[in-house]
Every structure is written in C-alpha cells, then in structure tokens.
Image (spheres, rainbow, N blue to C red):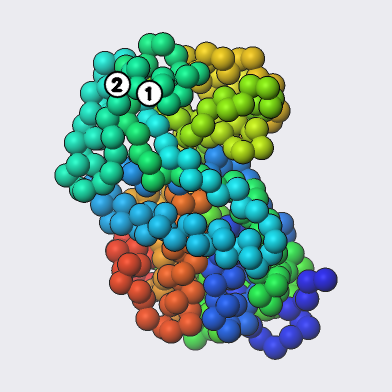
C-alpha cells in the first residue's frame, strides 16, 4: 500500500505531476537516495497515455533545433538500458521495440521536403538512407503504390507510453517514493524560496526542493510568483488506435510517417497488434474533445498512405495535450525561484526525452550542479520579467 506524506519525515523532493516526466525524475531521485513524494490524483496518467511513443529524434528533426537534437539523441541512446532497467526493477514490459522508422513522400513536394531533410541529416552526420518508392514498398508492402520515395532511419524506434507509465509507477513504489493521490492547489513560498505546496484538501506538505512537472498546467499552479515560468501552452493531438488481427500481421513492421498535403501523419505498429495513428496539432486551450473532423482527417490521410487501413477495427480514439514552451524545447533544472526546479515543456518529445530528463534533473537534485547537457534548457532562458 502506498504510504502517505504524513507517515514519514519531510521529503527531500516533492514532484508536482505524476506523468512519465515526473515519475522518471522521482524514480531516478529515489535511486540516488533522496526521499521523494509525487503528487498526482492519477499517477501514470497524462499525455503519455495518448501518445504513439515514437522515439524519432532524427526523423522529426527541425531546422534550428540542434541543441534539442543533441538532447533527443542522448535520450534515444539511453532508451534500451532505461527500458531494460525498468523491466528488471518491476517485471513489467515497456513495449520498447527497435523497429526503425520509414518516412515516405506521396507527391513531388513531399519528396523535395524529405530530400532536404536527408541532406540536413548528412550535414549533421546523422544516419538516414534514401530509398526509391519501390524500395519503400519492399520494406512495407502495405504502402500505397503512389509512394514516391522515402527516408529509412534505422535508429528511430518506439515504446508504448501506457506500459512505460505503468512501469514507472511501479518502479517509483519499489524505489521507496511516496505516491500521494492528491492535487497540488498552491505553491508555498517563504522568504523567497519554494518550500512546498498546499494540497486540494488543505493539507500542507513541505520539502527541500519542489519539482514542477505538471505539463501544460505547470505555470497555472497558484502561488507561483510572476516571471518564474513562461506559459506552457497545451497543443492538442487527436490519436486513433486500431487493431491488426493476427492473420494480417505484420501489417506494418516499423514506424511509418508521411506528409500528406502538408499534414504530418504517423502510424506506429506494436507487437501486440495495436496500430496507433496520429496526430492532429491544435491550439485551443485545455480541450481534449475528440472531433469528427479530427478522426476524419487522420483516417483520410492514413488511408492515402496505407489503403488497407480501412479494413482494420477502430478500437479507440483519444486526445492528449502536448506541453509547448515558447521555443518548443523543455525547461530542465533550477528556476529563478530558489527551491523550485522545472521538468516541463517537452512539447512533442515527452516520451523520447523521459530517460534523459530523469537523469539530468535527478542529478541536479542530488548534487546542486546542472549537468552540461541540460544547460541549453535552463528555465531562465526566456528572460521573463524579473521576480516581483
Ligand atoms: N511526437 C509526436 C507528436 O507530438 O504528435
């Protein structure tokens, strides 16, 4: 049974938010000998339960985001060991699969875009291979005959966000972290330092350091002084889950992405037959409604890419909120408010960046030094109006 905060001494670390980022930090911090409490009404929930779980720092590379690429590559390199350690610690599978990713072009504009990405990969020394349409279909026979070519990225893999979240909850428990199923209502600040939180029920919980890992709700915590965190905007992604009956497998053998008339779409096939299709990108606040239009667009584009998809049972629709910082890169490490540490703003890369975020933020919590890899992601980089 989970312990309650009142059962033990004041924790060293209080993590606000029990999604995969908060849980990863809590697990690593507990492994370093810190006393950790995680606050969340439903630990293991959040955007990871909707995410497809693509680990694609190379395929999803954006111009001007080289520091983020370095962080993503570092996390991707840690993933196999991170997943294996989680399984050893809990007996639970995370669904980590080394499938690689195929990004394909459906028309000549798409092909031009992918050719440029391939050239960019070459300039940065990244591994990706250009394939003709025929070669793409040889790898993935279910692709539409019209596919014009594509990029095969053999090191961009996948994990199952739901299994990962479940394993992290269990790993935290086994490492001695307390999971407290309540919501933080207010940050407590005393003499210019974050000292803890007041819970929804009125109980006060103090800690040596507070980690804010509440995704797109992070900056909305009452009591947060102005100028400490920028707004973390919620960017909605609608996602479909289909099921590939065993007689049709392998329907797809690897992650498949494409740009279809300017809309990015991806299909992520899991070993158990689940096929995740995502995702829309919508900025309209904290709204997770699944719309007919969203489902229609995803199915229309997925059908153009892989026509056989319309034969598969559609088993689930959902929407999650990506936490987007002003520059779409995460906030990692100490904030301008002493005692308050950020682990938020991971936007499209929360699942990918979980291992490296957990390692870097836990290292800071244990040592007081910001690891070099985390330096470009300082929460202070936004030059917000100074603390009042
Ligand atoms: N990384 C995939 C997405 O944000 O949709």
Residue 25: x %, y % from top left: 54, 68
Residue furthest to the bottom = 9
Q: To which quarter of the image does residue 119 belong?
A: top left
Residue furthest to the top = 145
Residue 137: x %, y % from top left: 41, 20
Describe residue 338's horizontal placement relative to residue 384 as left or right.
Answer: right
Find the distance from the CA under tag 1 to the CA under tag 2: 6 Å
- Front residue of 308/323: it is 308
Q: Is residue 193 above or below residue 357?
A: below
Residue 317: x %, y % from top left: 65, 30
Q: Secondary structure at mark 2?
A: strand
Q: Which residue is mark 2?
A: 132
- Front residue of 235/117: it is 117
Q: Which residue is mark 1?
A: 136
Determine crowd level at label 2: few under 14, some 14-19, many 20+ residues with C-alpha closer than 10 A: some
Q: Is residue 372 above or below residue 66?
A: below
Discs 1, 2 touching: Cβ within 8 Å: yes
Describe residue 7's horizontal placement relative to residue 83 as left or right.
Answer: right
Q: To which quarter of the image does residue 261 belong?
A: top left
The N terminus lies in which quarter of the figure? bottom right
């Amino acid at each position: 049974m989970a312990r309650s905060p009142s059962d033990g001494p004041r924790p060293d670390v209080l993590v606000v938010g029990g999604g995969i980022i908060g849980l990863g930090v809590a697990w690593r911090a507990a492994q370093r000998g810190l006393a950790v409490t995680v606050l969340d009404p439903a630990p293991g929930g959040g955007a990871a339960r909707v995410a497809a779980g693509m680990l694609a720092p190379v395929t999803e590379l954006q111009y001007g985001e080289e520091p983020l690429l370095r962080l993503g590559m570092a996390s991707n390199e840690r993933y196999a060991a991170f997943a294996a350690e989680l399984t050893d610690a809990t007996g639970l599978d995370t669904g980590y699969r080394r499938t690689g990713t195929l990004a394909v072009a459906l028309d000549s504009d798409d092909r031009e875009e992918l050719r440029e990405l391939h050239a960019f990969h070459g300039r940065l020394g990244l591994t990706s291979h250009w394939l003709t349409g025929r070669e793409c279909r040889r790898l993935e026979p279910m692709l539409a005959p019209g596919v014009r070519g594509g990029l095969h990225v053999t090191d961009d893999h996948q994990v199952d966000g739901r299994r990962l979240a479940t394993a992290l909850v269990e790993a935290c428990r086994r490492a001695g972290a307390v999971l407290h199923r309540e919501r933080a209502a207010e940050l407590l600040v005393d003499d210019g330092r974050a000292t803890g939180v007041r819970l929804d029920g009125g109980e006060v919980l103090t800690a040596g350091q507070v980690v804010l890992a509440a995704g797109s709700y992070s900056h909305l915590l009452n009591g947060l002084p102005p100028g400490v965190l920028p707004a973390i905007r919620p960017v909605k992604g609608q996602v479909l889950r289909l099921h590939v009956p065993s007689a049709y497998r392998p329907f797809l053998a690897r992650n498949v992405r494409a740009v279809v008339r300017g809309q990015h779409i991806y299909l992520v096939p899991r070993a158990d037959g689940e096929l995740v299709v995502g995702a829309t990108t919508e900025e309209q606040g904290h709204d997770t409604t699944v719309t007919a239009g969203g489902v229609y667009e995803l199915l229309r584009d997925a059908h153009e890419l892989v026509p056989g998809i319309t034969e598969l049972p559609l088993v689930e629709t959902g929407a999650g909120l990506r936490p987007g910082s002003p520059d779409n890169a995460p906030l990692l490490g100490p904030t301008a408010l002493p005692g308050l540490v950020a682990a938020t703003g991971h936007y499209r890369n929360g699942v990918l960046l979980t291992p490296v975020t957990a390692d870097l933020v836990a290292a800071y919590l244990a040592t007081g030094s910001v690891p070099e890899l985390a330096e470009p992601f300082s929460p202070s980089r936004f030059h917000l109006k100074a603390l009042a």
